[in-house]
Image (spheres, grey):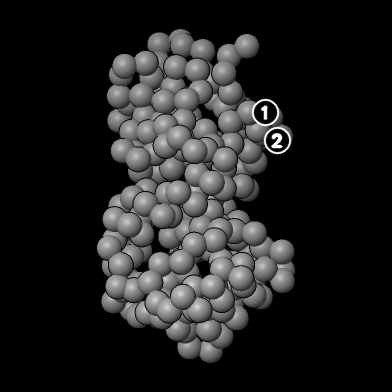
Amino acid sequence: MRVLLVEDSERMQKSLALALQKRGYAVDAVGNGEEAVWLGSEHAYDVILLDIMLPGLDGMQVLRKLRQKSIDTPVLMLTAKGDVSDRVAGLEAGADDYLPKPFALPELLARVDTLVRRRYADKNPKIRVGDLEIDTGARLVRRGEEAIPLTPREYKLIEYLARRRGEVVSKAEIEDHVYSEDRNIFSNAVESAISSLRRKLWPEGAEPLLQTRRGLGYIIEEAK
């Protein structure tokens, strides 16, 4: 899952980006409204965290520009303005949630998780596909009763595919949702990660639920 963090305070930006990365999110972080509009329009983020007080375009202007471009990414507004009128203005401009500063970090992470689940219509934090269970709260993957250790990148990939279960997901979509803007992506990075997931999740000849649709992408679905 990929998050756009828009925060002009360098200290807070670094702190929030680190917390989100530890939570398993790929994070792009910027400190001004112009960059936020450009990135938010160019990439399919799962959530945008948007501070209102920004240099240049403020958060409200950024939000309106994104919605005018028909960008429907869930937006969580962050601001020191806690008045009811400010919250109402943000929600009416198209925000999905609103968190006044100062806030507790666990609450912010929980709100981001909730917006991701809502985006993919998953009310339950545990996603099940056949005997595979992805616990998005604990960031754990199990087959039956066995916990399967994965790298952070492998976990991000299997969670994204599981949220899109039953759909063919292209390589480009995976790159857009799993990798940050500042990371160099090798041409075979997705294929390598898919291969590693298959070895770890379905060893010893077990029929993998994760299939390749040649020329189209990848799909995870229950065996028929």
- Marker count (numbered): 2
Between 7 and 209, the one nearer to me in the picture: 7
- Please identify the quadrant where the C terminus is shown: top right
The image shows residue 100, relative to residue 167, as above or below, that is: below
30 left or right of 90?
A: left
Callout 2: SS: loop
Q: How far from the left and from the top, in percent, is residue 40?
A: 59, 67
The disc at residue 213 is 1
* Residue 48 sits above or below residue 7 on the image: above
Q: Position of residue 5 (x, y in %)?
A: 45, 67
- Disc ID at residue 137: none
Against 152, residue 4 (above or below) is below
* In this view, 2 is above or below 199: below
Secondary structure type for disc 1: strand
Q: Amino acid at mark 2?
A: Leu
State the CA–CA distance, disc 2 to disc 1. Answer: 5 Å
Q: Position of residue 152 (x, y in %)?
A: 35, 43
Name which residue lies at 32% across and 26% down: 148
Residue that numbered label 2 is attached to: 216
Closest to the observer, 149 or 129: 129
Q: Is residue 121 visible?
A: yes
Q: Is residue 66 left or right of residue 19?
A: right
Q: Residue at x 49, y 52 (%)?
A: 115
Circle 1: residue type: Arg
Q: Is residue 196 visible?
A: no
Q: Nearer the viewer, residue 59 or 174?
A: 59
Within 10 Å of the Cα at label 2, are there few (<14), some (14-19), or many (20+) other Cα atoms? few
Q: Residue furthest front?
A: 84
Residue shown at the point (50%, 79%) measured from the top left: 85
Query: In the rendered structure, are the residues bearing label 2 and label 1 in contact, judged by CB atoms less than 8 Å apart?
Result: yes
Q: Position of residue 66 (x, y in %)?
A: 65, 70
Residue depicted at x 67% and y 28%: 213
